[in-house]
Every structure is written in C-alpha cells, then in structure tokens.
Amino acid sequence: MTDPALRGRGQTAALARFESEHDNIRGALRTAVRLGEEQEALCLVHALSWFWQLRNHQLESRTWARAAAGLGPDPFLAPLRHAEPFTGQCLDVPPPWTGERLWEARRGGRLLVLATEGGEGAEGAEGGSVLERPETRARLEAVVAAYRPGLPQTCRQPGAMWYFARLMTGGFGSLDDTLAALVGAAREHGDDWDVAFNLLLRAKLLGERPDDAEEALGLFEAADDSWGIAESLAARGETYERAGRSAEAAADFARAMDAATRLGAHSQVPVFKALLAAVRLRTRAVADDPVAWADAERMLVEAADEAGESGAEAVSTARLLLAQHYGNTGRTGLARLQLGVMEGEFADDTPGLFRGMLGGLRGWLACEDGAYEQATGYLARAVRDMEVLAYLVAPYLVVAQFAPAAWARAGSGAPEAGARLLGAYDAHRGALGGAGFRPYTAQTEAGVRERAEGVVREGLGEVAYRVHYREGGRLTVREAAGLVG
C-alpha cells in the first residue's frame, strides 16, 4: 500500500525525490480532496503513507488519510462488504480502479486513519478510554469481520492492522500469538520485504528473539533497504545489550546510526545515537575515563535535543534514556525535567500507555528521593492509565511498576504489600516479553529491584519476607496490580 520505490534498492533516491516534490504532491492531494476526486486522493495517500512514516509526519498522515477516506463510502459500515483475496498493491496500476482493488484502497484508507488516530488511552466525554467506547469496539469488530485468515492483503500494512484489531477484541490470547500469526501470514502470502518487516516488528515488540532480528537483517540487506537495515541492527543491538554484550551492541547501534544518516531518516538518527551513547555510559572502560564519560553523556543530551527537533514522538527513546541516566546518577531533578518535556508534548489523544509509563518513572524518581507516599500515588495512577491496553499488548508495562511500587509501599509503612509485589514481579517479569515497551533499561531495572528488596527486608525480617514473597509469586498480574496503591 506504499510506493514500492521506498522499499529496497533506490530507497535513498526515492526519498529525496519525494522530499523535493512533496509540496507539489501535497498540492495535488489538496486539489483532489477539494474536487471530491476520491480515487486520486486515495492513490496519493497510499503512495505517501510510507514516506510520511519514514519522515515522522504523523499529523500530516492523519489529516490527509481522514480527508481522502471521507470522500467515498466507508467499507466498514453496514452493510459490511467482506474483503476478497487481493494480491499486490493498489498502486500497482494507476486509477481509475474498479472492483476489489477499489474496495481494498478504501479499506486501506480507513485503516490508515485508524492507525494514526491513536488515542487508546485518551479520556472521552463519558470518562474511560477510547478503547472502552462502544463506537471504538464496534469499529474494531467491523475490521475483524471484513477480513479473514489467509487473505494476502493482511500480511502487509495497513491490512496487517487486522491482527491487532483481533487482539483488541479478544481474538488472540496475547501479543505473542498475534505476531506469530502475522509472521506466518507474511511467509505464506508476502514477499521477502513483508517477511522482513513483520520479523522486525516481532523482534522489537517482544524482544528476546535474536533470530528474528538476524533474519530480518539478512532480508533487508539482500533488498538493500537502508531503513530496514538500520532498524534490524538496532533491534539486534538491544538483544546484545540485554545479554551483556556491550561492545557488540555498540557496534550495531553505530552501524544503525550511520545507515539512518545516509538515508536521511531524521527521526531514526537520534534514537540510534541515544542507544549508542547509553550503552557506552554503561561500559566499564567509559565509566573509568572521565573524558570518555563526559563525551558519551554529551552525545546522549544531543540525541534528546535532536529527537525534539526531528518531530519524533512525544515519548522519545532518547529522552527516556537521558531521564534514566540522570536518575541513575542521582540527578533526579534533571530527570524530572526530561519527563516534563515529554509530558508537555502530550496531546488529548496521547495513549494511556505513554502517560502511565512516564508516571511510573516519576514514581521511581520519588522513591530515589525518599518521597514514598508521593511515589505510591504516581505508581497507582500509572497502572490505572495503562491498564486498558497494557494487559492486551504490553502486560510487562504493568509488571514493571511492581518493583518501584514494592519500594514505595515498604517505605510508606506497608512492607507486606511490598514483599508480595516483589514476588509477583519476579514471577511475571521474564514470561511476558514486551521489549519494545520496556520503560527501564536493564541497568535501571536491576537497581530498582535491588533497592526495593533492601527496603522490604528491612521492614519485615527474613521469615515474614519469605512468606509474603511466596504469596506474591502466586498472584496474577491483575491481582498484584491491586496492591500498587
């Protein structure tokens, strides 16, 4: 559903062409919308969708996708028109389109709107999240009903959103199941690029799957796709880092940064730069060298600033890493300033997952400062903010709050609850994946866990600690979440 020139060989030249002609193309799109030329508008939106994603033009993507989709009938309204097998892309031939090609273009246009609207955690007029609203549920169910397993268009974007709509409506038991089905569909019906893209998606969202990142990297290298090469290197680098292979992680992050720089993928470069700086700051050689340490910290600060300039998402990887670095080095005030910058970028439709993630970090920082009552409040709110969607797509985000919450509860006079939370944290943290949504680096997480246990043990004694810890290990994630605040 995107211009094939933006995938694989010739990608850099194609991006430069899109960049130079963007104003003219946008003018043509504006004219098509004004004149009500549905097919011309849909064609341009589909052609630009991947360019907008690579350049992080989310507002533009949402605005024009909504305008183009509104020019024709909504294929997800009753009477529902069920999708038929459609191979290739709508853009394989120019308009005018007929039959299934036209209807798939219409479905794709509406799915692009759904993908860019976000808002799964935004508060509605009646309270509660967008995901809880009847109209949102009905919309997702209509998407699920329109497609079926085995359709080739569901293995590539935006049709692949069908799998996530199924997840959100209970069609899959977990994100792992969802991504396994998506990768399987890509292997059966897609081309090598589709397989690589979905392997990369699984590597980033689930983590702990180095084979996925390796295979995706090989496929993207065969296609000479700089974007995919950079993202796959970064995914593999994060796997190396979690395994303690810092030198190999740094090498992959450096290669990823170089590839993104050559491509001109402005929103990617600060992410890889921050990952490289952060892993350097955690190596013994840099820690023992004041000059190298200062250089690495300066690189991390630059990456955070560049992320803002590039128009990256409000909750940027670079700022998260910088905030954690400041927190880990005792500079909690500076860490909170970074969180404040991100929160200042929040819009009404910012997902509750992001709000909760930053709230949880505020809870950790409050623990570092000994403000345990305040920390408990932050962490309880964080779990409420993220609970609607986190249990479906990122349960680890909830589990990650248990260690700082154990610290906060014990510090504020409830060590029994703290011990149970630690037991639940240890029981669930390794089984839920979610690397793409992890709010803490491995170093921060280990430090929080250690500090929490120390405070809990001090408040209970060894025998009582073991009893309550074992009780917590038998709790479900939802049950343990009730102990946070």
Image (cartoon, grey):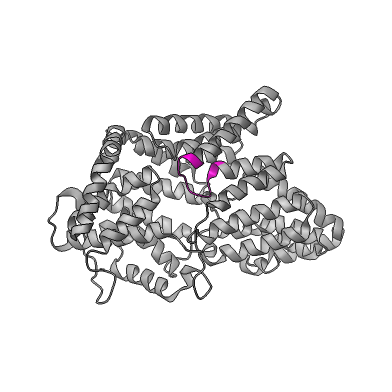
- Bounds of the magenta span? 308-318
Q: Position of residue 344 (x, y in %)?
A: 56, 52
Left or right: 152 with respect to 410?
Answer: left
Position of 21 relative to 351 (above/below): above
Q: Residue at x 87, y 58 (%)?
A: 461
Q: Residue at x 38, y 74 (%)?
A: 138
**Residue 400, quarter of picture:** bottom right
Q: How many marks?
A: 0
Q: Is residue 311 magenta?
A: yes
| Quarter of the rendering occupied by the C terminus | bottom right
Q: Position of residue 45 (x, y in %)?
A: 27, 52
Left or right: 200 with respect to 122?
Answer: left
Q: Nearer the viewer, residue 169 or 331?
A: 331
Q: Position of residue 49 (x, y in %)?
A: 31, 49
Q: Main secondary structure of the magenta part?
A: loop
Q: Residue at x 73, y 53 (%)?
A: 366
Q: Is residue 69 visible?
A: yes
**Residue 266, quarter of picture:** top left
Position of 71 relative to 357 (above/below): below
Q: Is residue 108 visible?
A: no
Q: Residue at x 45, y 40 (%)?
A: 310
**Residue 311, quarter of picture:** top left
Q: Position of residue 148 (x, y in %)?
A: 30, 66
Q: Is residue 439 magenta?
A: no
